[in-house]
């Protein structure tokens, strides 16, 4: 049995993909931090409380819903 080994060069992401990823990271961070600035009344309007807003704001940047991912 003969096997061929090929050495492939790792592919870099398209520059546009990287820019979109950085924009999503920035938007996610901005939105999560904005939750911390909402008062109790505004949080109730969106069905949240201070504890859940703080938990959301402190999530790691890569912890986003599947449909947000590239």
Image: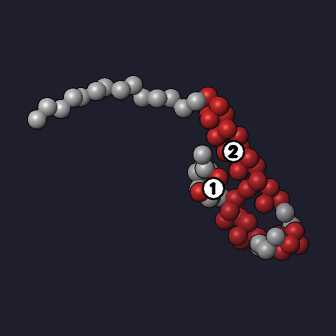
Q: Earlier in the sequence, mark 2 or mark 1?
A: 2
State the residue position of label 1: 67
Which residue is painted at 11% across and 35% down in the image? 1
Q: Position of residue 26 (x, y in %)?
A: 71, 43
State the residue position of label 2: 24
- Residue 40 visible to the viewer: no
Q: Is residue 69 above or below residue 58?
A: above
Is 14 left or right of 52, judged from the image as shown?
left
Viewer-side residue, 28 vs 12: 12
Residue 36 marker: none
Q: CA distance from mark 2 to mark 1?
A: 12 Å
Which residue is painted at 31% across and 25% down in the image? 7
- Crowding at label 1, few (<14), some or many (≥20) Cα neighbours within 10 Å? few
- Crowding at label 2, few (<14), some or many (≥20) Cα neighbours within 10 Å? some
Q: Indicate which label's residue lies in the foreground, 2 or 1.
A: 1
Res. 59 image quadrant: bottom right
Which residue is painted at 70% across and 50% down in the image? 28
Is 35 left or right of 70, judged from the image as shown?
right
Q: Position of residue 13 (x, y in %)?
A: 54, 32
Q: Position of residue 38 (x, y in %)?
A: 84, 63
- Residue 8 visible to the viewer: yes
Is 37 left or right of 67, judged from the image as shown?
right
From this viewpoint, which residue is outermost toward the front? 1
Which residue is painted at 67% across and 45% down in the image? 25
Q: Is residue 33 above or below residue 5?
A: below
């Amino acid at each position: 049995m003969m096997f061929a080994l090929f050495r492939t060069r790792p592919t870099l992401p398209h520059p546009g993909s990287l820019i979109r990823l950085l924009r999503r990271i920035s938007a996610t961070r901005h939105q999560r931090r904005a939750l911390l600035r909402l008062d109790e009344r505004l949080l109730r309007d969106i069905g949240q409380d201070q504890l859940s807003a703080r938990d959301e704001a402190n999530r790691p940047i890569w912890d986003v819903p599947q449909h947000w991912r590239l």
